[in-house]
Image (cartoon, rainbow, N blue to C red):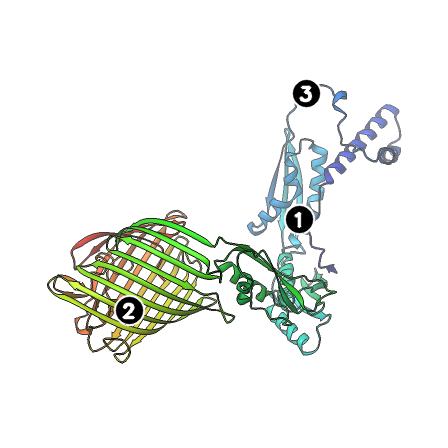
Amino acid sequence: MIAGGFLRKQDYAPSLQQAEKASVAGAFVSIMSKNLRMPATAAPILAVSFAAWTLLAFPSVSLAQTPPESAQAPPATTQAFRYVVELAVPEAQRKLLQDNLEIYTARDNPRMNADQLRFLVRRTPEQMRELLATEGYYSPSIESTLEERQGAWTARFAITPGETSRVADVKLELRGAISGEESLARLTRMRERWPLSKGLVFRQSHWEAAKRSVLQLLLAEQYPAAKIASSQATVDPKTRQVSLQVVLDSGPAFSFGDLEVSGLERYPQSIVERLNVIKPDSPYSQAKLLQLQSRLQDSRYFTGATVSTDTDPERPVRVPVKVQVAEAQSRKLGFGAGASTNSGARGQLEYEDLNFLDRAWRLSGLLKLESKKQLLSGEIQFPRTENGYVDSVSALTERTDIENVLTRKHTLGAKRARVIGNTEKAYSLQYETEHDVIDGVLNESSQALVPGYAWTRRQVDNLLYPSEGYLLSAQVGVATKALLSDQDFVRNHLKGTYYRRVGSRGGLILRAELGATLARSREGIPSDFLFRAGGDQSVRGYAYQSLGVKLGDAIVGGRYLGLASAEYVHWLKPQWGAAVFYDLGTAADSLRDFHPVHGYGAGARWKSPVGLLKLDLAHGREAGKTRVHFSVGISF
């Protein structure tokens, strides 16, 4: 019978000293036999007596120790003792043995000699058996030889691991305060989660991981003081069958108490309370602690936050929830500069006050000046509600000059958003007025009051540099002439991106976008609720928003949009890659006029600190021109 802790690797450090002492005893026997002409049978008895006397008289002195430096003779120049180890073993077990056998780790010991090597060769097979047992091999065949030719030593080992031992049965027991139906339900979940099931190879690492996995089911929910009372693995080397038994002690059931918040100076405690998902007297839940901590860290009020509870089994009822926060600066002023092929050079000024009017309202302002666009915006965002909603109001004024259309617009908006996991839902109300000027063709104003709904899901492995997963976004907005709008319309917009790894260094990106504004005509609809295409994040090879409805020398928005793109990226280095792509799509005012254009090319990719940087050279087939496109990050 082998207990659960039996299969641990032993500490083999003392063996060299044992070998050295054996060598000294051997030398003593040789000297005494030669000089005193003692009978051969008496010499071993005398050697044992001498060794015992040495250990008793000088218990703190190792026989292998060298004399004090003052008593040593000048060191002689000697060649270090060397030997070679040869293993005849399947590759699957070679690294395990080479990394852990003492005969390998002792090769650099300056005190190594032939006697010590012989001792290690005799000891190594047992070490091999113990190491192979951790991988499920309990009946290995091991042959060893030691050979010396002209001062060159070679230790050879031939190992046949044999058949692996496999799990025959598993018994899980649950004790402690947990009882009745709850105990049966937990045991059922443990058996379902138990990874080391019948028929699998028994490995020590898998055995330990399996025990941790079932214990975590108790620790995570209501029983944070749970422990493994006993565990046992019984191995039958003849049948190569392993019987497993684990007994868990749940300990007492814990419940949450009140919040205990520390670290607050400039912000009110109500911020933490509104983010709190833990109710007093509710059962202990590790997930709830992590959720609260994540909410605090994601809120821009704090640079750091930790959430914890005490798990003293003597005090399990109404355990205080301890929250420690580090506050962020309440006021920030930022400057920025940049450039893109969509809108040209850019400079911007940002201001943020996280404690506006001392009520923890978040006031933000942005002044952005670009070659083709200038805007001034402001927003007040209110603290998160107890249900997780974030409410905000905003105002914006903007001037754009794109594709010979001069547009001035003013917007007032209100929004309620909520994020649950990877999904964001937002309800909005937006009032927009717009004035468009096209020299000699158009000079008109429009307005719309649009209630809207947006749904976004981000299911990717990395938000900055996604390589697996998808992004989906769906939006709908409605306007009517009966309520501050110049046109009746329903605007629908759907966008998706799919990421897939290809081999060890490649990646495929598929992108699609559809839009439709259902109305009698586009007249009286502000441009934000219509569609144009072309540019870095649209159809490459065409200028920014150059695909749409032609009006004189200008391009204005249409009621329909359709885009598709396929891109392959090959990463030459972890941070640098090359891409090829093919885009097609357009925007039009009717399905009859919808004629997609094509763009294709190649580019470079760099994983910058602020997101993926793209530099593309794209050719627009219908335009007959080649353009450079530059962008950072992903849209969503």
Callout in the foreground (3, 1): 3
* Secondary structure type for disc 2: strand
Q: Earlier in the sequence, mark 3 or mark 1?
A: 3
Tell me, yes or no, whether the two marked residues, 3 and 1, touch with CB atoms within 8 Å: no
Q: Earlier in the sequence, mark 2 or mark 1?
A: 1
In the shown orientation, is residue 387 left or right of residue 343?
right
Q: Is residue 447 above or below residue 207?
A: below
Amino acid at dot 2: Glu
Q: Residue at x 77, y 21 (%)?
A: 71
Q: Single out the residue that lies furthest toward the left.
A: 440
- Label 3 crowd (10 A; few <14 / some 14-19 / many >=20): few
* Secondary structure type for disc 1: helix
Distance Cα–Cα, label 2 vs label 1: 78 Å
Q: Which mark is residue 432?
A: 2
Q: Which mark is residue 76?
A: 3
Amino acid at dot 1: Met
Q: Position of residue 636 (x, y in %)?
A: 36, 62
Distance Cα–Cα, label 3 vs label 1: 37 Å
Q: Which residue is mark 1?
A: 128
Q: Residue at x 33, y 56 (%)?
A: 568
Distance Cα–Cα, label 2 vs label 3: 94 Å
Q: Which mark is residue 213?
A: none
Which residue is more in the foreground, 373 or 227? 373
